Amino acid sequence: MVDHEISENIKRIRYNVEEAKAKYRKSDDTVRIMAVTKTVPYGRVNAAVNEGLTLLGENRVQEYLEKKDFYDPKAEVNFIGHLQSNKVKYIIDSVTMIHSVDSLKLAYEIDRYAVKAEKRMDVLIEVNIGREESKSGVFPDRLDELLCEVSELKNIRVKGLMSIPPIGRSEESFEKLQRLFNDLRSSCYKNADMDILSMGMSSDYVSAVRYGSNIVRIGSGIFGSRK
């Protein structure tokens, strides 16, 4: 079933991403558009999947568990919200990446349940680039230490970084995170393959593409304002 609003929104976002790539990036760079599904009914999510947006971002464990069996089989689900360590067991079997690792405690639980699930879980380290006390994420000056600790865990593979910038400070935050990401890529960590930089949402994804993001996480830009 085609949802014309979603279809037109996706066309516009794809156009904007390609324009930003043409202006700031190499022609063969890949930027994946993630459909963020918080509060979105599964039927509308599947309409986005039908348009080729097969990468989904889930924020809440309970909401995801209620919807996941109704998703189009082509969908690949990443968990992007704050994750409590006692909720890891509910999602470990069905998500392909966790974007919000910000502590060794959480990483230990992911590793423990990944062993039970007989899988190696891809994760991103969430960076609190603005050092905001109200937000989750590791502060930049603790990032190298956390990376060293997490990369020792055998059933986790660190794939890169994720961040949400402070309101009104997207561009400077993206630039800082890009520099940090590029510096870390030249370091050698066990069980790490630092090739993903996940930043940019509906209001600032074009700027994020400019500064090297290869996953942009878009909710309202695709589905409209949350009800």
Image (cartoon, helix red, strand yellow):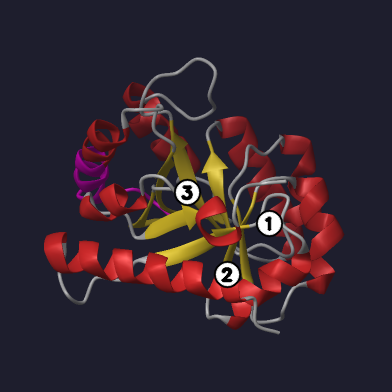
Instruction: Residue 69 in the image: state x and y as whole percent.
Output: 83, 70
User: Residue 6 shows which numbered tag?
Assistant: 2
Residue shown at 44% from the left, 37% from the top? 164
Is residue 180 in view from this perspective? yes
- Taking the image as shown, residue 195 lies to the left or right of residue 4, namely left
**Dot 3: element:** strand
Q: Evaluate whether residue 188 shows in this view.
A: no
Q: Nearer the viewer, mark 1 or mark 2?
A: 2
Which is in the foreground here, disc 1 or disc 3? 3
From the top left corner, tell me how far across and down residue 1 is, in percent. Answer: 71, 84
Q: Which residues are magenta?
A: 178-191
- In the image, taking residue 200 as reference, residue 227 lies left or right, namely right
Asked if residue 190 is among those painted magenta in the image, a careful observer would answer yes
Which of the numbered marks, if any, corresponds to residue 124? 3
Q: Is residue 29 left or right of residue 149?
A: left
Is 175 placed above or below 20 here? above
Is 60 rendered above or below residue 13?
above
- Name the residue at 39% across, 68% down: 12
Q: Choose the circle earlier in sequence order: 1 or 3.
A: 1
* Residue lying farthest to the right in this orientation: 66
Frontmost residue, 77 versus 11:
11
Q: Distance from label 1 to label 2 (Cα)?
A: 35 Å
Secondary-structure class at tag 2 = helix
**Circle 1 residue:** 114
Measure how far apart labels 3 and 2 are at the Cα level.
28 Å
Packing grade of label 1 (10 A; few <14, some 14-19, many >=20) is: many
